[in-house]
Amino acid sequence: MYNAKSMKAEEFICHEEILDTLAYAEANKNNKELLEQIIAKAKLRKGLSHREASVLLACEDEKLVQEMFALAEQIKKDFYGNRIVLFAPLYLSNYCINHCVYCPYHATNKHIGRKKLTQDEVRAEVIALQDMGHKRLALEAGEDPVNNPIEYILDCIKTIYSIKHKNGAIRRVNVNIAATTVENYRKLKEAGIGTYILFQETYHKESYENLHPRGPKHNYAYHTEAMDRAMEGGIDDVGLGVLFGLERYRYELAGLLMHAEHLEAVHGVGPHTISVPRIKRADDIDPGVFDNGIDDATFCKIIAIIRIAVPYTGMIISTRENQAVREKALHLGISQISGGSRTSVGGYTEDVRPTDTEQFDVSDQRSLDEVIEWLMELGFLPSFCTACYRAGRTGDRFMELCKSKQIQNCCHPNALLTLKEYLEDYASPATKALGEKLLQAELPNIPQEKVREVCLERLQKIAQGERDFR
Ligand code: SAM
């Protein structure tokens, strides 16, 4: 019996169903009537099943693809407005006992420098990030129970939240560490994390096992069921992702959407975010050896289809992608981007971008200020908002807000306030001038008059030195 609610993630995201979906999609890729029906359903903004989304992904009719792109952009605007949330990764440790063949942190890489931040170094890195203007971090670490046990990660989170530096404070710490136990997820929840992020890497079990030949990450079921354990441990915002390039992209899209369906069916709430990393060159890793690389056009199509299939889910693109690709992706549904990122352990306190402990080459090497200015030039509203998380609007409460479109009365003013803080404290003169104009233009877009008035009052108070309105 194929029942999403009673099946474990690994059983539900099953190989046979994915193959059947791909065959169905291939058989229908020129079925105009069905394609139009699916696009019409997508326009209702209630999402699509993995089978429907897979048919759209197989479709090569340029006119229909353009229609999907326009719809993806419109759906993003309807649910998230023109806001783009900014964050930065913080690499804590690259000690790792796994053997992921695509990752330079693999245990057999003997020439990469191994490094783990002390709490003083965490403090220094965070101050460097705060001095750029960051308020949200994604913590990254290899898996190593001796060097990076959960206690180490918890200490780092505690250190980060305790740092009060000038006008800065990190307000949300998301965590991207290896699959762990319910008990450890509970500890992360108690430490006040935002989203728990874990990329599946690939949903193809056999490839997964070959790509992770040894180490704890080899266990496909344990990895695939991590989000269920995280939710059992009380974390209600979880972030999915696939590392595109490892397996066939159509297989991955079907698996990813089935994972989202599983979470929705079992826990009543889908993923808070979906990331779309593509494999990159790194130390002893040559992405060319993975023969499932996807070109930019296919990548964009995947992003647009994820957006229309899971309209309420945040979508993240990192600095693995260059400026041009990030610009296209922003128009297809991305709602969060990283900026000013360094993927080396201790990289933010170095004057020159270090490469010796880097996890992958960063394609977008612009500063956070350049990214903010660029976003505004493109008509987006950069946001450092963390209000929902701090007010407890996570999991299904956040999704309800998003679905009811009340987000415009809530997130929009918060975006304006946090942008104003950035402009006052960190922006270059050019970014500040552009930002002030944007604030004036965006204020009338807050629908409720009362909310608008409060926002205006707070903007004035920020100019006079007050910070962090809640
Ligand atoms: N160690 C944790 C784990 O195994 O899930 C997570 C941290 S790891 C630093 C974050 C992600 O980086 C991985 O899940 C993988 O998808 C991605 N990654 C690894 N090697 C990469 C590469 N060469 N290019 C792009 N992304 C890569």
Image (cartoon, rainbow, N blue to C red):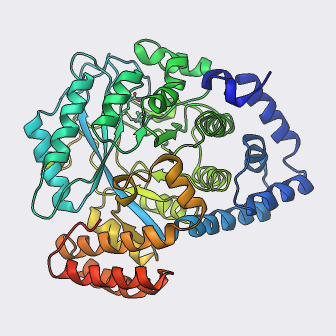
Q: Where is residue 265 in the image (x, y as percent from the top left)?
A: 66, 36
Q: Is residue 332 visible?
A: yes
Q: From where the camera sits, is residue 180 visible?
A: no
For this orientation, the residue located farthest to the top is 214
* Lateral position of residue 467 relative to residue 359, left or right: left
The image quarter containing residue 337 is: bottom left
Q: Quadrant of the C terminus?
A: bottom left
In the rendered structure, the answer to whether residue 457 lies left or right of residue 166 reads: right
Instruction: State the residue at coordinates (21%, 20%).
Output: 147
Task: Indicate whether 453 appears above or below 330.
Answer: below
Q: In which quarter of the image is the N terminus?
A: top right
Q: Nearer the viewer, residue 258 or 293?
A: 258
Question: Which quadrant of the figure shows ligand 1?
Answer: top left
Say which residue appears at 30% left-offset and 61% top-offset.
366
Asked if residue 317 is positioned above or below residue 23 in the image, the reply reads: below
Query: Residue at (61%, 66%) from the top-left corner?
Result: 73
| Coordinates of residue 431 in the picture (x, y in percent) | 28, 77
Q: Position of residue 445 (x, y in %)?
A: 48, 82
Q: How many marks?
A: 0
